[in-house]
Amino acid sequence: MGGSAAIVVHRATARPLHETGLVLLLCGILAAYSLDRLQDGADIADRSGLLVVLRIGAAIGVVGTAVLLALLPLRTAMLVPVLGALVLAYSRLKSLPLLKTVLVPVAWTWSVIAFPFQDGSWFGWQAWSVPIAIPLTCMIASGCLLCDLKDVEGDRDASVASLPVVIGVRSALLIAVALSVVGAAVAAAEHRIGLSVGGVGLGLAALYPEFLARDIFGPLLVDVILTLPGLLIALHIV
């Protein structure tokens, strides 16, 4: 999914792709999601194989990020500790009202544009001036809401204020659909057909919440849909 998003940004901006920044992005994604699952802990404590895989993934991600950090320009590299702090604090931050819904799409969009397509700005802040940032953020936010469906009961028990917990599943689905429609519409206006297709896919997936609520199937379906735009571009279909 990270590679797909980078392809989408590359097509939209026509900026040169910095391979070091791309690999660092992928290592950061690996580290972030592995550490998040390890911090949750409860659902993997009795699954030793998964625990080992997550530890290896986290180690590879963290070490890879640290090594590649030295090869980045200082202004771009400054974003790494900011995002790293968010990852380490995420297990606590996501218990704050609605913050879980905001943090993930912001971190994804910021890093996907700033690291592989360095613009020389401090913390890569000019990533937010790129037009593709708006539909990309909407799409990822929509995907995050759909992925939250599988965690409703767990989030409620753990006092995690995800949007489905705060306003209910039905209302959260409506917001997810609205975000996907906005993302698809803005992408279409920018002539980003692949991203528009992804937005339509998310909207259609939201019609089947019972499937999205399945522990493995739901998130995997969302990830596949979010990966589709870059795949369509890579295959020269759009």
Image (cartoon, rainbow, N blue to C red):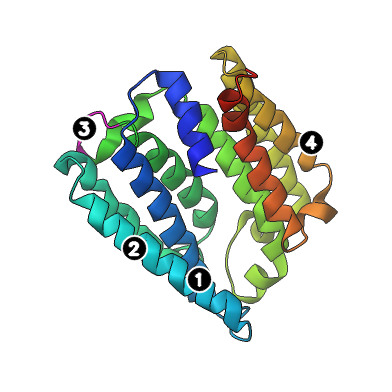
Q: Name the residue type under label 3.
A: Ser
Q: Position of residue 67 (x, y in %)?
A: 24, 56
Circle 2 residue: 62
Within-10-Å neighbours for mark 3: few <14, some 14–19, many 20+ = some
Q: Name the residue type under label 2.
A: Val
Mark found first going from the N terminus, 1 or 3: 1
Q: Is residue 125 above or below residue 81?
A: above
Task: Answer left or right for 199 relative to 4.
Answer: right
**Region rendered in magenta:** 118-122
Q: Position of residue 42 (x, y in %)?
A: 59, 81
Q: Quadrant of the N terminus?
A: top right
Find out whether the residues at labels 3 and 4 contact each other: C-beta distance under 8 Å. no
Circle 1 residue: 54
Give the SS element for disc 1.
helix
Circle 3 residue: 121
Q: Name the residue type under label 4.
A: Leu
Question: Image point 25% across, 28% down: which residue?
Answer: 119
Judging depth in this view, the residue of 5 and 179 nearest the camera is: 5
Question: Image point 21% across, 32% down: which residue?
Answer: 121
Could you give the CA–CA distance between mark 2 and mark 1, rounded to whole angstroms?
A: 12 Å
